Image (cartoon, coloured by chain):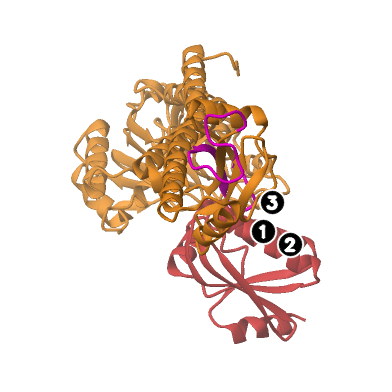
Amino acid sequence: MSLNLTTHENGEVTILDASGKLTLGEGTSSLRTKIREMVESGSRRIVLNMNGVTYMDSSGLGELVASHTTVTRAGGEIKLLNLAKGVDDLLKLTKLYTVFETYEDEASVVDSFSVAK
Amino acid sequence: MNHNEFPWFKTAMAVAAGVATLLLVDNFFMYRYVTDRFVRYEGLQQAVTEVHSLESQLRREHVDTLDNLQRVLTARLQDRNEEIAWMIVIAASGQVQASSGIMEPHALPSADRIRAVIERGESDSTLRDASRRRILIALLPMKRHFQPQPPLGTPGGGSVVEVGLYLQPVESIVNPLGRNLLISTLAAFLLLTSIIVSLLRMPGYVRGRMLENQVHLARSVQRRLLPETAAGGIEFAGECLPADEVGGDFFDVFRTNAGETVLVLADISGKGLPAAIRMGVVHGAIRALSLAKEDSGIACMAERLNDQLRDENSREFVTLFWAFYNPKRHDLLYVNAGHLPPLLVASMSGEPRRLETGGPVLGLLPKARYQEECINLDGDATLIAYSDGLLEATSPAGEEFGESRLLPVVRGSMRQSAQEVLRHVMEEADRFMEGGRAHDDLTVLIAKLTREPTTPSQPAP
């Protein structure tokens, strides 16, 4: 099973719903392509909803950080929503959680963007 | 790659391909031959029967004029246009005496052929592909004679019948033969296809095998890079089991000129050859940095390493546990870059301490900051560092090995040598996986940190 990506808008925020496995190969490359497309089409406030991501390997983690770099470099922001325990543990272990703001519900992540502005 | 390799294989393949082609060609001619022979024979038999039947009818009904002959012929062929295309009675002179049926355009038999049939009493047949089906055109002698034709035996006497018969397909006549031909043709065709596929895939296969050999060599190189037991001046034991032939995990133990023992355990993200190649780079960088260690500490060394490994589009990273043990001061200075916290068991308390101080994984974040920690040890201590292959080693039941399973092994092994502790950890991991293979590289390093007896002339600074 690969990674399934769909987007929906909530105000000025684009929410990217991911489900499946974020692993080396199809998973990482489809996330990379999607993020690039979103940035090119002008999205600057992006939330990656990881609710359906059941498994992530080290390449997936690397891709997550690369997505952050891509969005930040374009002057945007990417935040994470609904991390599964395994994914959350991996972010904590690798001490990469400082890179991302993480949230547990869509309303508060969307609010966080408007507060910042 | 040299494409002239395995000449025996290519020769054998070429021979097999030749045989298969021969078989296909032979099948084709066999089919044509059998079709012709059987179908022609069957058709001729039918034509002979037809002419005999006609002649007996003519005899029975005393038909001896051409008008009556035409009537009989027309009647006979009525409702039989599925079997018989046409029948023509031709006099020895070549003149058509009567005819019936749907005639396919063709030339009437020459006078020579007619004479040959009449004089020798033989039949003569040809096959042709007509608009509807294949047709057998048979020329047969006729004994009956009609007014005002000279009788048979006299010059210019006698007639022949030309019968055009629609042929049955050969399969309906010799069914098993048709099946046999079909199967052998199919077999020859498949054989030829598989040979061609094998030949086309051969170079890729050979390349794959050569690459496999290279990887095998790389594995032994990687194994030789692991430190020997005598290195570093302390007692230690380690194991590094790549999930594939080669992996991105490594550990190292060596002594600096300042008399400190460096303990390293790192995990390069990814698996296999790409991870192994990057591992070589990381290993070398760590050694170089370790040997050039300055008093400014190791956190800044981790920062420098991070900068070295990072590039704009990094997706790969390294988790690293990097420690300097000073046997004289009996302290351990370490930095942990996003690696699973190693366990430090001091024999005084027996309770393991997790070595977590440090920062994020190396090679991903620009300007990542690291912290170091220095632990002053009281008595002897055992350090257990491992890569996530051990924690994520999956059991057939799907659960993960987990630190909780590691702790009892480690606590219970305090009075054992490093080698024994390692053996117990590996046994436990093995038992847990029940002989299955680790999904990730699995690396364990056990080190005994024992105070070096200090002489009065070398007081600890």
- The answer to which image quadrant residue A81 occupies is bottom right
Same subunit, labels 1 and 2: the answer reads yes
The chain letter for the residue carrying disc 2 is A
Q: Residue at x 40, y 30 (%)?
A: B328
Q: Which x, y percent locates residue B260? A: 46, 29
Q: Which residue is drawn at 34% across and 42% down?
A: B176
Mark 3 vs mark 2, foreground winner is 2
Q: Nearer the viewer, residue B321 or B185?
A: B185
Tell me the residue that label 1 is attached to. Answer: A32
| Alpha-carbon span between mark 3 and mark 2 | 24 Å
* The N terminus of chain B - image quarter: top right
Q: Which amino acid does label 2 sit on?
A: Arg
Q: Which x, y percent locates residue B37? A: 46, 33
Mark 1 vs mark 3, foreground winner is 1
Range of magenta residues: B128-156
**Seen in the image, is B194 located left or right of residue B414?**
right
Tell me the residue that label 3 is attached to. Answer: B367
Residue contact between numbered discs 1 and 2, judged by CB atoms under 8 Å: yes
